[in-house]
Amino acid sequence: MSAGYAVIDGKAAYDGRTLAEWLPDILDELVAAADPQRIVLFGSVARADDGPDSDIDMMVVLSHLDYARRRELTSHLRSSLSSPAPIQLFLTDDRECRRRRDVVGSMHYNPLREGRLVHERARRVADQLPPPDAPVLEPGRRPMLLSVLRGR
């Protein structure tokens, strides 16, 4: 354990902060370093039953992951974090999540079922606008931007 380790109310704490209290900083740093599509918190911290020997478990879902470089990328991300708390990062991509989400025993199964979504990349506004030639008004009706956005 590091010099800044303590147990506060039965939970692991590093430099006076519990694992849950480190999450905002960790998320900010991961998002800045990797621009992930999603981050899923799973394990004991997600369930709020973490104890003195717990760590932070996160699935980091990237747009695309070169699996030959997964270990290198994981190491790079871990070293970019300033938190002294123990963190386990599981890197994957959206395609692999879709393929393996229902495979019992896969690394994707439990996080996608029991985890907490703690970050999702915001959609760009341009991706949400109707095409330039889409009608905005119907004669005698209110603006239909919402119905265009909903594909009606």
Image (cartoon, rainbow, N blue to C red):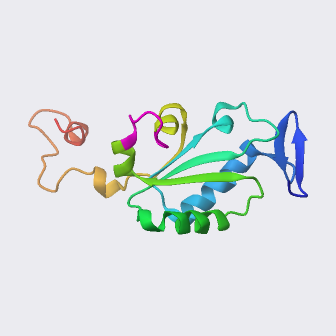
Write the residue at 71% across / 45% down: 55
Q: Nearer the viewer, residue 121 or 100?
A: 100
Q: Is 86 in the magenta?
A: no
- Residue range in magenta is 100-108
Q: Nearer the viewer, residue 2 or 122?
A: 2
Write the residue at 44% across / 33% down: 104
Asked if residue 109 is positioned above or below residue 94 in the image, the reply reads above
Tell me which corner region of the image, top left, top right, bottom left or bottom right, holds residue 50: top right
Write the residue at 15% across / 32% down: 141
Count of marks overlaid on the render? 0
Residue 28 in the figure: left or right of residue 123: right
Q: Nearer the viewer, residue 122 or 141?
A: 122
Task: Give how far across and how far down residue 89 sits, in percent.
Answer: 59, 53
Q: Quadrant of the C terminus?
A: top left
Task: Give how far across and how far down residue 1 sits, in percent.
Answer: 85, 53
Residue 57 in the figure: left or right of residue 83: left
Q: Is 105 in the magenta?
A: yes
Task: Give how far across and how far down residue 25 sits, in percent.
Answer: 68, 55
Tell me which corner region of the image, top left, top right, bottom left or bottom right, holds residue 133: bottom left
Write the residue at 23% across / 37% down: 150
Asked if residue 146 is positioned above or below residue 121 in the image, the reply reads above
Furthest-front residue in this view:
105
Residue 54 in the figure: left or right of residue 30: right
Asked if residue 85 is positioned above or below residue 82 in the image, the reply reads above
Q: Main secondary structure of the magenta part?
A: loop
Asked if residue 36 is positioned above or below residue 23 in the image, the reply reads below
Task: Give how far across and how far down residue 101 sits, in percent.
Answer: 40, 38
